[in-house]
């Protein structure tokens, strides 16, 4: 995503919005032919009629001057002219980079657009035509209020290190030191002195690398385009208050008239642990508290925290951090909105919407939350009108239910047990993923990660840095690679060791775990999602990938991981009090069983295809088609007999 792409997307959305409204405005003009109106509407119509100089030949309908005896049509005609200019100006800027249409001939903010429509609505209601007012006009007003002139608001996202690089280059050029090497206190002090001062910071002849230019050009795009195109400025890998203040300063220096709200995103396990303290330090800065006007948004990352410490520890730390962040916000009198950066899959924080919201800590939602919807699940959640409506119903129902019937807080002994298990789970996960010397080699051989990395199917490169191991790999390919082999290692790794540790320490802990599962929504949802992943997994398929693709000396390592898979699955069933996987969800169990044959076939095909890609000398001996063999060996009447032993009724 480059500054040019950001600019084009915003202009394209603006063009589409103007076009959508423009296609409806003439229908409204047809409908509102009435002459009865208030004095205010009559005067506005007279004024517009006298100032309109020529006929508009580029319109299909109402291209001649509308008489003032049709006041609503005169006012809506002016709205139509401005919408036409808004659309054409966006088109020119997209195709040529400039436009001859002046900005004041267009709509630049949604208030300008709503004002004449609301004027017509009030006039119709006053003159006894409320039925007409609450028809197409009210629908149109609601559309404009919802989608504005930008159709969607685009969030800008940039890594904190990139802002540090920009400020370091500026301070080095000005010979006042190296921003990167300064302590957090010195950074804050300098940033605040610049924010409260008025002198420009960035010199005109300031030398810029490609990376620095990219950051500043993005901020110039924000300054150039109307502010309603943008939502929040999200700082990924945020760790401290200076990360937020740095963005505030850069927005000012790039002349952003209406600065975007700045949202720190805490992703790694250590950053999540330190998040409440960092936010408390941020709120204790008077300048910043005055700037936010009692509202703050904080984003928490599910994908990278899971990749960093495993699903168990990440889920528990996310829960604790949210509860602590809410306490900090209450202490400073700030309304905090949590922004959940959840992925589509369980390994990246995904799962059923309703359950996910209801399992959040008490007091963390308060009728408002933000959630990312990943590209891979947009189609299944919003692809059709009824699906879209159902998804919005789920979000609304769960948000209301969480507020009216908050989930219980964990008992102190539950929280203590979770803390103990999280330490063991993190250690187990990291000892295999980051400390096992040959893990990276095994991972790259046993999964199609390298092949997918070469395919241009992602919005970003699969790695943050070209070199490096698992640390530099993005969370999406990390989870996706293990999903392909039906092993789902990042989801369950660590759970087994944690359960085993606390049960071995005190056998009564199994009863406490079962009590937590039955009474605490957060723990139940966490366990149920992992149980679902086990139902989708198949160590036999993972063994096939190992046999075909992994070198023989690494086979024992794969066998050890598969033994861990089975042990973790059995412990999980014990905690949930289930004899079989998905015992509590027979419908899902049936669906998974039905699709298993198709997915297994695809897995086998993929494993052999990978073998042939990696080893050009490997040949697969093709057998005749199965159907041909059967057709030649059995008479036709035998083939049409129903199988009496099938568990599925014919």
Image: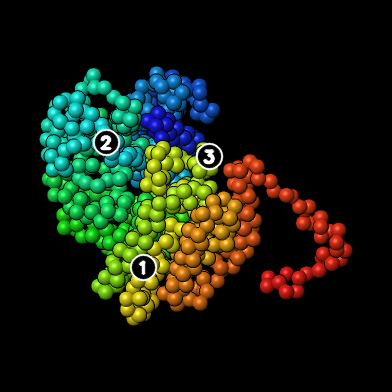
Q: Is residue 402 left or right of residue 545?
A: left
Residue 498: assigned label: 1
Q: CA separation, marks 3 and 1?
A: 37 Å
Q: Is residue 638 left or right of residue 102?
A: right
Residue ID at (38%, 72%): 500
Residue ID at (35%, 34%): 42
| Residue corresponding to mark 3 | 455
Q: Residues within 10 Å of mark 1 (few under 14, many from 20)?
A: many
| Residue corresponding to mark 2 | 163
User: Which quadrant: the C terminus?
Assistant: bottom right
Give the structural element (helix, strand or loop) at label 3: loop
The mark nearer the N terminus, 3 or 1, is 3
User: Which quadrant: the N terminus?
Assistant: top left
Which circle, 3 or 1, is nearer the viewer? 1
Q: Residue 11 location in percent, x, y?
A: 41, 31
Q: Residues within 10 Å of mark 2 (few under 14, many from 20)?
A: many
């Amino acid at each position: 995503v480059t500054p040019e792409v950001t600019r084009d997307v915003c202009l394209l959305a603006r063009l589409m919005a103007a076009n959508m409204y423009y296609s409806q405005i003439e229908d409204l003009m047809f409908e509102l032919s009435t002459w009865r109106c208030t004095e205010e509407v009559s005067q506005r119509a007279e004024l517009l009629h006298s100032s309109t100089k020529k006929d508009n030949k580029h319109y299909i309908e109402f291209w001649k001057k509308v008489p003032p005896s049709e006041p609503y049509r005169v006012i809506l005609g002016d709205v139509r002219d401005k919408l036409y200019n808004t659309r054409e100006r966006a088109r020119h800027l997209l195709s040529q980079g400039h436009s001859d249409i002046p900005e004041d001939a267009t709509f630049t903010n949604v208030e300008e657009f709503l004002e004449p429509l609301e004027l017509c609505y009030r006039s119709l209601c006053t003159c006894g035509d409320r039925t007409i007012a609450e028809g197409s006009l009210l629908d149109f007003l609601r559309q404009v209020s919802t989608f504005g002139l930008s159709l969607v608001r685009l969030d800008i996202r940039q890594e904190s290190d990139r802002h540090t690089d920009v400020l370091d280059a500026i301070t080095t050029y000005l010979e006042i030191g190296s921003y990167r090497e300064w302590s957090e206190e010195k950074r804050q002090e300098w940033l605040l002195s610049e924010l409260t001062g008025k002198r420009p910071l960035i010199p005109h002849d300031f030398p810029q690398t490609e990376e620095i230019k990219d950051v500043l050009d993005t901020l110039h795009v924000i300054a150039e385009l109307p502010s309603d195109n943008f939502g929040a400025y999200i700082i990924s890998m945020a760790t401290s208050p200076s990360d937020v203040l740095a963005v505030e300063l850069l927005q000012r220096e790039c002349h952003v008239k209406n600065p975007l709200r700045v949202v720190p995103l805490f992703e790694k396990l250590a950053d999540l642990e330190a998040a409440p303290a960092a936010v408390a330090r941020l709120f204790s800065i008077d300048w910043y508290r005055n700037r936010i006007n009692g509202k703050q948004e904080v984003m928490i990352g599910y994908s990278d925290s899971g990749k960093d410490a495993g699903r168990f520890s990440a889920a528990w730390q996310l829960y604790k951090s949210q509860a602590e962040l809410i306490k900090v916000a209450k202490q400073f009198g700030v309304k905090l909105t949590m922004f959940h950066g959840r992925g589509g899959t369980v390994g990246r924080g995904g799962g059923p919407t309703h359950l996910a919201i209801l399992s959040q800590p008490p007091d963390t939602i308060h009728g408002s939350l933000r959630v990312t919807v990943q590209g891979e699940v947009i189609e299944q959640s919003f692809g059709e009108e009824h699906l879209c409506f159902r998804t919005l119903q789920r979000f609304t129902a769960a948000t209301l239910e969480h507020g009216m019937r908050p989930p219980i807080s964990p008992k102190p002994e539950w929280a203590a047990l979770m803390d103990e298990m999280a330490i063991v789970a993190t250690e187990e996960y990291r000892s295999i993923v980051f400390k096992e010397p040959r893990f990276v080699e095994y991972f790259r051989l046993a999964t199609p990660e390298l092949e997918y990395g070469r395919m241009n199917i992602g919005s970003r490169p699969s790695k943050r840095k070209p070199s490096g191991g698992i640390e530099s790999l993005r969370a999406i390919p990390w989870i996706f690679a293990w999903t392909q082999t039906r092993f789902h290692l990042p989801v369950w790794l660590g759970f087994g060791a944690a359960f085993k540790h606390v049960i071995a320490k005190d056998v009564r802990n199994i009863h406490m775990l079962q009590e937590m599962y039955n009474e605490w929504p957060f723990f139940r949802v966490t366990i149920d999602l992992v149980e679902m992943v086990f139902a989708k997994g198949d160590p036999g398929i993972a063994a096939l990938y190992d046999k075909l693709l992994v070198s023989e000396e690494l086979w024992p390592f794969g066998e050890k991981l598969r033994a861990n898979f089975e042990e973790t699955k059995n412990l999980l069933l014990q905690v949930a009090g289930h004899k079989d996987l998905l015992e509590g969800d027979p419908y899902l169990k049936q669906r998974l069983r039905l699709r298993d044959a198709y997915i297994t076939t695809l897995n086998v095909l993929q494993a052999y295809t990978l073998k042939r890609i990696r080893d050009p000398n490997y040949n697969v001996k093709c057998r005749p088609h199965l159907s041909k063999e059967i057709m030649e060996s059995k008479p036709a009447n035998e083939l049409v007999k129903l199988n009496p032993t099938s568990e599925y009724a014919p």
